[in-house]
Amino acid sequence: MKTLLKPLFGLLLAGLLGQAQAADPVTIRIGSPDQGAGTTPFIAGPLGIAHIQQQLEQAFAADGVKIEWHFFKGAGPAVNEAMASDQLDFAWLGDLAAIIGRSSGLPTRLLLSARGANTYLAVTPASGIKSLADLKGKRIAVYRGTADQLSFARALQSQGLKEHDLQIISLDWSAAHAALASGQIDANWSGMGVLALGKQGIEFPVSTKQLPPQATTQAGLIATQAFIDKHPDLTQRLITVLVKNAAWLTAPQNQAAYTQQMAAQSAIPATLFEQEMKGDDLRFRNSPRIDPFLRASLQDSVDKAKTLGLIRRPFTADEWVEPRFVDSAIQQLNLGALWPSFDATGKAL
């Protein structure tokens, strides 16, 4: 009898353990650089809306799936470190940081597009800088290792300039803004937040609004291959929530509500969000598609990162991107006509 009970007990124990493991809730861990000016964690765009409105928590609540948010003051490098330590499943990153992570061996895939964020040349009045050509020999701050660096490289290329023509100092956004306001540097190439220095007399002679679309900052949502393989259904549902948000953002009548929502969360004035997006094509800015423009831009970013010595192992954008989730969401939500594909130059096909 004891001999018969042993295998039965073993099977029962294994079954109970299997049930307990199956009952363990899945946790989706999402990371992003903290882009806010206050104490409240902040990220803009479709993921920012999801964070503020707790959309993912609501979308997965019935299944017992937990959502963890991680915001990093150390920008892209800190996010890559967390992903390398298996602390994150998804991350919202600018292209350069995501490329550096991938080149360093992080098994990530880029699932959703973000493109067209504008960057500004902020200068002190005493610098005499009126154009990109005037930057020769000047002290300019750029946050190396972030998408700003690639945007700046493209801006310089449009004028036949290279980084070694300037005195570039790597400073994070807060330090660069402080150094510019105090006159310790001549200029800063930075995102929307630098516009706040206009009240202190800082001038903005050039921005990506006057340059080809390729000079703008590209970003996106990346995920680990392990999470995608283990939870393709959860990955799809998460992407579908973000595609819905991208559609909402594409409607002009929602811009005021969006800027107010972002301002309240970020402690950045709503007028700066409005100024940064003014005149831009919302279909281009908010398209989640992995289209020819994004593929070409990412490949150019990989190539520039290699040329600038920022990565050792280049790769192709086509082997990195994974468009099936966003394509499925667009089809499911019947949004195919909302966003055209844009070619490598940023023109609608």
Image (cartoon, grey):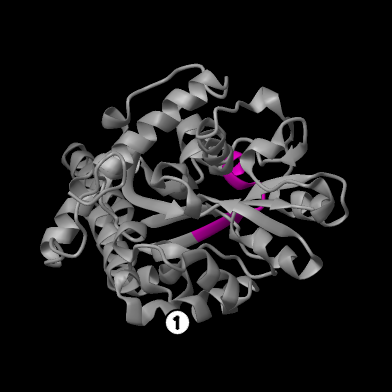
Image quarter where the N terminus lies is top left
- Residue 77 is a magenta residue: yes
Which quadrant of the view contains residue 336?
bottom left
Residue 183 seen in this snapshot:
yes
Q: Percent position (x, y) of residue 266?
A: 61, 71
- Number of disc labels: 1
| Residue 343 drawn at (x, y percent) | 24, 42
Image location (x, y in percent) of residue 125: 80, 55
Q: Is residue 58 above or below residue 194?
A: below
**Structural crowding at the residue carrying mark 1, measured as other residues with C-alpha within 10 Å and reported as few (<14), some (14–19) or many (≥20):** few
Indicate the secondary structure of the residue bearing disc 1.
Answer: helix
Residue reaching furthest top?
312
Query: Is residue 89 at all visible to an observer of this figure?
Result: no
> What segment carries the magenta color?
69-78
Given residues 314 and 222, the one toward you in this image is 314
Q: Is residue 100 left or right of residue 230?
A: right
- Residue 303 versus residue 87: which sits nearer the camera? 303
Residue 323 among those drawn in magenta: no
Task: Report the side of 322 relative to 308 (left or right).
Answer: left
Foreground: 299 or 241?
299
Q: Is residue 183 left or right of residue 344?
A: right
Q: Is residue 263 above or below residue 123?
A: below
Q: Is residue 214 above or below residue 331?
A: above
Give the percent coordinates (x, y) of residue 50: 41, 69
* Residue shown at the point (46%, 40%) measured from the top left: 95
Amino acid bearing label 1: Ala
At 13% from the left and 63% from the top, the residue drawn is 337
For disc 1, the marked residue is 256
Q: Residue at x 34, y 82 (%)?
A: 253
